[in-house]
Amino acid sequence: MTAGHRQEHGEHREHREHGKHEERREDAVDLIDETVAAIAPLDEAAIRDARDHQARLTKPPGSLGVLEEVSVRLAGLAGRCPPPLPEPAAVAVFAADHGVHAQGVTPWPQEVTAQMVANFLAGGAVVNAFAAQVGAGVSVVDVGVAAELDAAPGLLRRKIAPGTADMTAGPAMTPEQTRRAVETGITVARELAAGGARCLITGDMGIANTTASAALIAAFTGLPPEDVTGRGTGIDDATHARKVAVVRAALDRHGLAPGHGTAPLDVLAAVGGLEHAALAGFVLGAAALRVPVVLDGVIAGAAALAAAALCPDALGGCVAGHRSAEPGHAAAVAALGLRPLVDLELRLGEGTGALLALPLVQGAVRVLHEVATFDSAGVSEKPGAAGDGAPGGPAPA
């Protein structure tokens, strides 16, 4: 069965089940609770094995820097060393519209969301080019695009609502919409993993979604709106000032001042987007399956904060693919304790930064599989040989 056929099959199955969603909820185990319960901490024995193995490889200890930590983390996720190679990879681009668009936070019309979805499906976007470069599959998940989208290969039609409500006037989502969006993300992670994906990549599309991201990051970190609200698609000073004011108004409207104590799902409902909630579920679903996730930019960072608030151990398999130019993203990855692998001042979204980082993640794991140890290669170690560039000594400056 091809990837496209798998996606279409999953879509048809989801539609058959969608109408039964309400009746099932009372009888079935709650999908979010079930998923969170399946998430375990990283395996400490596997982490030790990976660190020991790194120390025996034919290279100066620590000479691969952050990549060594990536390999160790993924060994802990898998519970063995070496962990499985994180390939093939699959990108899920979660798309949705935002009611806060009405507040003039971006000059781009809302119709661009649906137009860009069509571009993704036609293979004409940057995410498609970068995915082709690294051999990753691309699925687009409609969780809340305002327009109705026709069926197409690669499109998963899981629309929960035609966009969110304006978060400055009331909650962006109802509690039921929020839960369904998180559940959708979990389900998509399960489907992609069942289809053979061994690494999942977050993608997003939604005009005005950086405004909702800023509100979520401020709510989860306690930082002021002006510190986490960026220029998104390149807005001017006046629009940026309006955007900061809109984020502050939404936080005030929902009582999300520092130390608010609001439950994570309620924060998502108040100021999040349907794609943020779905991405949070995507992270949770992957963590329950012990499948690594490469996070993209500020939208993924905001969603990961929500996932971590629901289950801190969900971060075990997350890798920050890059550091976005959006100030909120730097705040999010700092709060998450993640080290971005790439810093190229990107601010596109779609999953592009994560895709650029994918070969680094794969290379980090491949080292554990393929690089010889000193013993197996017959290379002599020189403990205590400082600064001479010997394999067993410290790396030269």
Image (spheres, grey):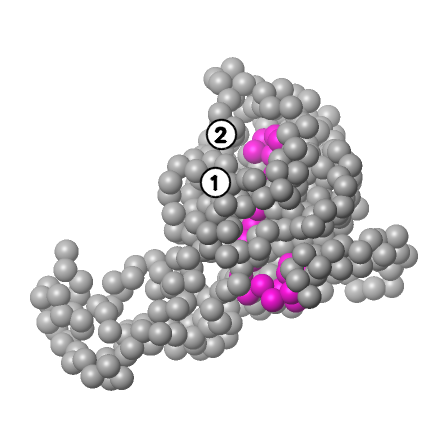
Locate residue 286, reporting x and y percent.
60, 61
Give yes or no for residue 310 being in the magenta stretch.
no
If you read the primary sequence from the N terminus, does the residue marked by circle 2 or circle 1 appear first? 2
Label 1, residues with CA under 10 Å away: few <14, some 14-19, many ≥20: many
353 in relation to 189, above or below:
above
Residue under pointer 1: 329
**Image-quadrant location for residue 172:** top right
Taking depth in this image into account, of 331 and 288 the one nearest to the observer is: 288
The single residue placed furthest to the right in the displayed view is 23
Task: Give the labeled residue for mark 2.
Answer: 230
Q: Residue at x 60, y 66 (%)?
A: 196
- Percent x, y for residue 283? 59, 55
Question: Viewed as shown, does residue 383 lie left or right of 268?
Answer: left
What's the magenta region?
189-212
Identify the element where label 1 is drawn: helix
Asked if the residue at tag 1 contacts the one at tag 2, i.e. Cβ–Cβ closer than 8 Å, the answer is yes
